[in-house]
Image (cartoon, grey):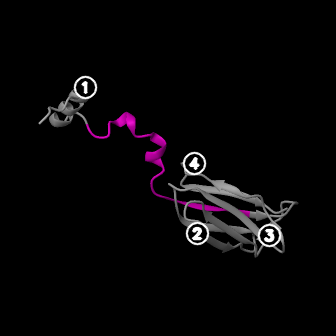
Amino acid sequence: MKPIRIGWVASIALIALALGVASFPPAGLLPQAMAQNMGQRNVSGTVVDADSNPVSSATVFLKNEKTKAIRSYTSSAKGRFYFAQVNMSEDYDLWAEKDGRKSVVKTVSNWDTRKEFETELKMK
């Protein structure tokens, strides 16, 4: 059987792991943003018209870009909408529609570390 040769950096890493003075993965290798984006967030906001008046009974859509699953919510009399338990490790598209009008599509990004994502959706 042929001996396995590893470099000196790998040797030091294996010794450090064996002695318990290092962990895997090394702290510097796990991106901070990735560690922060684990869990769930709330996505909420207000649907407004071109004059910034609240739009009631608009349908607000939240589309998971990975799975293509869509959740919807009907805005309140004050134009408010709310989605709970939105996975922080995935990207979503967010928009509102009513009577043939549609807002601009906004992205809820997995890079955004806010646990409470608040926005305004302006109808065109």
Identify the residue at the far front of this view: 1
| Nearer to us: label 1 or label 4 | 1
From this view, report whether residue 30 is shown above or below residue 7: below
- Identity, as a three-letter code, of the amino acid under mark 3: Val
Q: Position of residue 76 (x, y in %)?
A: 71, 74
Residue 33 vs residue 82, the one in the foreground: 33
Within 10 Å of the Cα at label 1, are there few (<14), some (14-19), or many (20+) other Cα atoms?
few
Q: Which mark is residue 37?
A: none
Of the residues under marks 1 and 4, which one precedes in the sequence?
Answer: 1
Q: Which residue position holds label 2?
A: 69
Under circle 3, the secondary element is loop
Query: Which residue lies at the image location 85% right of the left edge and 62% below the top edge?
Result: 124
- Identity, as a three-letter code, of the amino acid under mark 1: Gly
Residue range (magenta): 23-46
| Nearer to us: label 1 or label 3 | 1
Q: Position of residue 102 (x, y in %)?
A: 80, 65
Identify the residue at the far left of this view: 1
- Identity, as a three-letter code, of the amino acid under mark 2: Ala
**In the visual, does 86 lie left or right of 53?**
left
Q: Which residue position holds label 1?
A: 7
Query: Which residue lies at the image location 57% right of the left edge and 48% below the top edge?
Result: 112
Under circle 2, the secondary element is loop
Q: Which residue position holds label 4?
A: 112
Q: Which mark is residue 55?
A: 3
